[in-house]
Amino acid sequence: MRYIPSFCLIFSLLLVSCEQKNRKTNIQIIKKQGAVKAFVKPILPTTDSGRLILHLDSLPKIKFPFKSEWYNRTFPTVCISEFKNKKLFNLPLKLIPTQIGLDDDEADSTFNLVDTTYRGKWNLIIKKPNFIVLEVENHLVTMAYDLKVIDAINSAGAQGNNHWNVERFSTIYKNLKIVIHNEYIVQVDEAGNFETQAKWNEKWFIDKNGHFKKK
């Protein structure tokens, strides 16, 4: 029988013991990490403002100055069905009458934040500490974080027929100054050619409370 020195035998026993101990320790760490992952759950906001911010944070950011145009309505869709208890329909709209056509006495002075399925096409302009600025359809809207609309105007639009047309678009700046551009276009001959007869701009701004004011 081959003789094994005692110190070699002792070293081998210590090595096996350390490996078993390390294996047990690693298993305990893996189990512990798995337990942590199993019990960690996302903390969802419980307030209306917190849930609204989640929707707003999902919207893409815009670049300033931003041009609000009536024919460019490719906004993301948000579903806010959890806010059915809020006033989301027939909200007041501040009309800005032009010389002809837009925002006249026959224009609808209300708007909706969403459709009947509680989905709305929203374009996030900016988040301020006490209100949000959104573009909803052709309207520029200021709204508090509890979904109460503060103010709204028509920032873009078009109205007319085969003989005349009025168009509006707006340029919005990061400091919440707004230039509303209006154009009056008329038919100039029987061939159906149109020509811009008048252009006029109006300077507006949003005050610290979220109201639209004309300079």
Image (tube, rainbow, N blue to C red):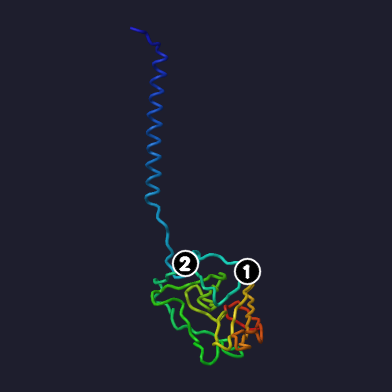
Marks counted in the figure total 2
The quadrant where residue 195 appears: bottom right
Q: Quadrant of the N terminus?
A: top left
Q: Give the residue type that dot 2 points to.
A: His
Query: Is the residue marked by circle 1 packed among few (<14), some (14-19), or many (20+) residues within 10 Å?
Result: few
Q: Residue at the location (62% across, 74% down)?
A: 172
View extreme (left): residue? 1
Q: Residue at the location (63% across, 79% down)?
A: 205
View extreme (bottom): residue? 105
View extreme (front): residue? 191
The residue wearing badge 1 is 64
Q: Position of residue 78 (x, y in %)?
A: 45, 69
Q: Residue at the location (40% across, 11% down)?
A: 5
Determine the secondary structure under disc 2.
Answer: helix
The quadrant where residue 162 appears: bottom right
Q: Residue at the location (40% across, 19% down)?
A: 12
Q: Label 2 to label 1, Cα distance in Å?
A: 21 Å
Q: Is residue 172 visible?
A: yes
- Residue 55, labelled with which disc? 2
Query: Is the residue marked by circle 2 packed among few (<14), some (14-19), or many (20+) residues within 10 Å?
Result: few
* Nearer the observer, 190 or 78: 190
Q: Give the residue type that dot 1 points to.
A: Phe
| Left or right of 111 in this view: 101 | right
User: Which circle's residue, 2 or 1, is located before the other in the chain?
Assistant: 2
- Tell me the mark number nearer the camera, choosing from 2 and 1: 1
| Left or right of 121 in this view: 97 | right
- Residue 130, labelled with which disc? none
Determine the secondary structure under disc 1.
Answer: loop
Q: Position of residue 122 (x, y in %)?
A: 50, 72
Q: Position of residue 213 (x, y in %)?
A: 61, 83
Eyeballing the image, is 159 above or below 31? below
